[in-house]
Image: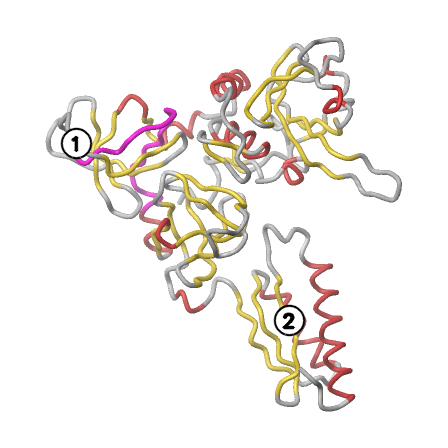
Amino acid sequence: MVLSCTPGKRDLATARSLIDSLRSQAIVDSRIELFIVEAAWSGGRVLLTGKTTRPEVAADLVKRLKERKIACSDSIIRLPDPALGEQNWGLVTLAVANIRYQPAHAAEMATQALMGTPVRVLQEEDGWYLVQTPDRYIAWTEADGIALKTTVQMDAWKGTARLIFLGDNGLVLEGTGAASMPVSNIVCGGIVAREASPASHGALQAVRLPDGRKGFVDGPEFRDFDEWRGVMSADPAALVVFARRMMGRPYLWGGTSVNGFDCSGFTKTVYLTGGVILSRDASQQVLQGTVVAEPAVWQGLKAGDLLFFGRRAGDGKNERVSHVGMYLADSRFIHCSGMVRVNSLDAGRADCEPSLLARLLHARRIIGAGNGPATLKTHPWYNR
């Protein structure tokens, strides 16, 4: 837009400078908080548009403009979008919901969420919801995969007797007969509600999905959710057993289910089976837990420690963490690169990859760490 006067150009330039400054100061990680704000010249004043999860930052912007005697119109959407009304929570209704960086099927996949995962619904756009997952990651998913809930309805769900699926892949069936058709599939980590049923169905359990669909599941692969998370403590041996169960699973960019992982999606899923909610990306996971000194000296590592790889700082470039795996024992670690596989930190062994070993940056201990991540036992989105 062509600006009509020099004062307008000056005011607009000031507004844009303030936006950039506040964004850099207040938004530490744009994957988990948003300040997408733009300024334009309209009707003789600065027009502010966009959206943010940090309303106090938007208010600060308006305040600073007024202090500089700059007239502005504030059209910034404070998320959750008021247009959603009271239904600004949701539960994932698909076995695995794909979550993308933009509201389009062709957009890059950011992450995934499993059935029964609670999400904060922030905005709706053309059949897509902008959601925030329990690890605080923000991206878009199809509206068909989310059952919208009010705060009251979410509290009711938290108080419902729930079951967690700990098998690999399973089915929710419409009936109890041998010819019963599926209502939905479900993967490890999926959560459903236990449905009261007056009749006995043998090993089958009546359940209700987050969107109200009902069916039956094979009981032995399901555990009472409250009971399970009550005793879950990220036992290293159990993490190793589950991780090894995933051997050969394919690499999938953005994947966080047993059907396919990226590197951090793999470690995140392994720890989820131990009741721990790791951050989404390797560059976020490296900030959790406690530092294990000298990660190259693998004798000091313990099962469950996370190993981080990437580019070292130097030659004017910052350090960049781009890969993560989990330590097993005897110098070996498991990770997803092409597929889930095991490699060694010992340069003298055949399963060591020298190029990968040269990129080893850090090791972090999650189990028993003071700076540990959230757990299913304590996360407020899962608990009343």
Mark 2: secondary structure: strand
Residue at image coords 35%, 36%:
191
Q: How many discs mark residues in the rendered view? A: 2
For the C terminus, the quadrant is: top left
Residue annotated with mark 1: 180
For the N terminus, the quadrant is: bottom right
Q: In the figure, is residue 17 to the left or right of 155?
A: right
Residue 53 percent location from the top left of the image: 56, 60
Residue at image coords 55%, 23%:
340
Q: Residue furthest left?
A: 199
Residue type of the residue flagged with mark 1 = Ser
Q: Nearer the viewer, residue 107 or 37?
A: 107
Q: Is residue 166 magenta?
A: yes
Return the disc, 1 or 2, that comes first in the chain's sequence.
2
Q: Quadrant of residue 125?
A: bottom left
258 shown above or below 46: above
Q: Which mark is residue 38?
A: 2
Residue 46 percent location from the top left of the image: 66, 82
142 shown above or below 47: above
Q: Is residue 158 magenta?
A: yes
Q: Label 2 near label 1: C-beta < 8 Å?
A: no
Mark 1: secondary structure: loop
Q: Which residues are magenta?
A: 157-174
Residue 130 percent location from the top left of the image: 48, 56
Q: Quadrant of residue 152?
A: bottom left
20 shown above or below 331: below
Q: Nearer the viewer, mark 1 or mark 2?
A: 1
Q: In the figure, is residue 167 to the left or right of 21?
A: left
Q: Tell me how the rendering is colored.
A: secondary structure
Circle 1 residues within 10 Å: few <14, some 14–19, many ≥20: few
Residue type of the residue flagged with mark 2 = Glu
